[in-house]
Image (cartoon, rainbow, N blue to C red):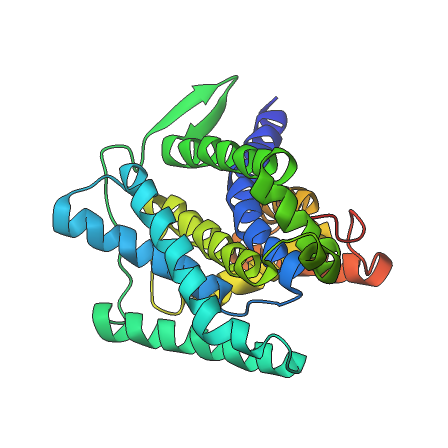
Amino acid sequence: MESLVSLLQSLANGILTGGIYAMVGIGLSLVFGVMRVINFAHGEFLALGMYLTLWLFRATGLDPFLAIPIVVLMGVALGYVVDRILVGPIADGPEQGFILMTVGIGLVISNTLLLGFGAHPQSIYTSYSTSTFHLAGVSFSVPLTLSFVITVVVIGALYWMLTHAEVGRAIRATAQNPHAAELQGIDTRRIRSLVFGIGVALASLAGLLLLPVLYVIPTVGSVFTLKAFVVTVLGGMGNVLGAIGGGLLLGVTESLGATYVSSGYRDAFGLIAFLLVLLFRPAGLFGRSRV
């Protein structure tokens, strides 16, 4: 009986964490699906969301979950401006240009955070940070459960927008054939900037959701850039729905590995799954791009 409860506990922890990983991966996958750009600063934008939430909490006492509208709007605006000024102008250049540009943006963000907040780990403590509730003998973290519910709502809203809203149709048309989309009167340049903004907003929101349960340091972004890349590859590059499966798979793999092997190698188990998928299914578990 104890072994079954332990297994269920591990699965529950993995699914809750994997939901947030999915949000991180969806942002990266959406940007790649539309722009064919791998944003190597994705994790740094997540760190930016964490520090913005941290600053709002300390300066105004604003609860992290109530800061969601501010962080999301900041992410969309920042991503839109960054694409307009830095990424968009090199859209017709070689792929190496995108890599160098996004790596440079990430370095600027992490060093700015280092200058502004220092190198020491920081976190916040709320009345519910360590709260849990129990269901069928399994313990659930209140902040992680809230984060998972918010993630499901955000992913559902994003899916509805992509499949039903006019702007979603424009995004899918731009992803499938930008030249044909332009012939239909779609401003693909504006759509690309909007998509980059949505990607940054999703990364920043994931940072906000992680802050109540994690410490933050200026270099934390590199860890989550790697995780986002793993999630994206597991789900299939550019496959937004596949990124959900990739995030859950990464979260469950890490949790099971930490429970039954060693918590010290938690991140390594995700990378092993990543290498196995690359070896047997190079296009990812869920196939090709389907933004």
**Above/below status of 14 relative to 4:** below
Quarter of the figure with residue 110:
bottom left
Tag count: 0
**x, y percentage for residue 41?**
49, 68
**Residue 186: which quarter of the image?**
bottom right
- 104 with respect to 253 (left or right): left
**Quadrant of the image occupied by residue 282:** bottom right
Of 22 and 274, nearer the camera is 22
> Which quadrant of the figure contains the N terminus?
top right
- The residue under the point 44% across, 31% down is 145
Place of residue 28 in the rendered image (x, y in percent of width and height, measured from the top left):
58, 57
Q: 105 and 279: which one is in front?
A: 105
Q: Position of residue 238 (x, y in %)?
A: 69, 55
**Residue occupying the far top of the picture:** 136
Rendered position, 270 above or below 11:
below
Residue drawn 54% across the image and 31% down it: 9
Q: Residue at position x 75%, y 53% from top?
A: 289
Q: Does any portion of residue 115 appear in the rendered image?
A: yes
For this view, does 61 lie left or right of residue 8?
left
Residue 163 x %, y %: 65, 36
Q: Is residue 65 above or below residue 198?
A: above
Point 44% across, 73% down: residue: 85
Q: Is any part of residue 252 visible from this angle?
A: no
Image side of residue 193 versus residue 231, left or right:
left
- Relative to residue 93, is residue 139 depicted above or below? above
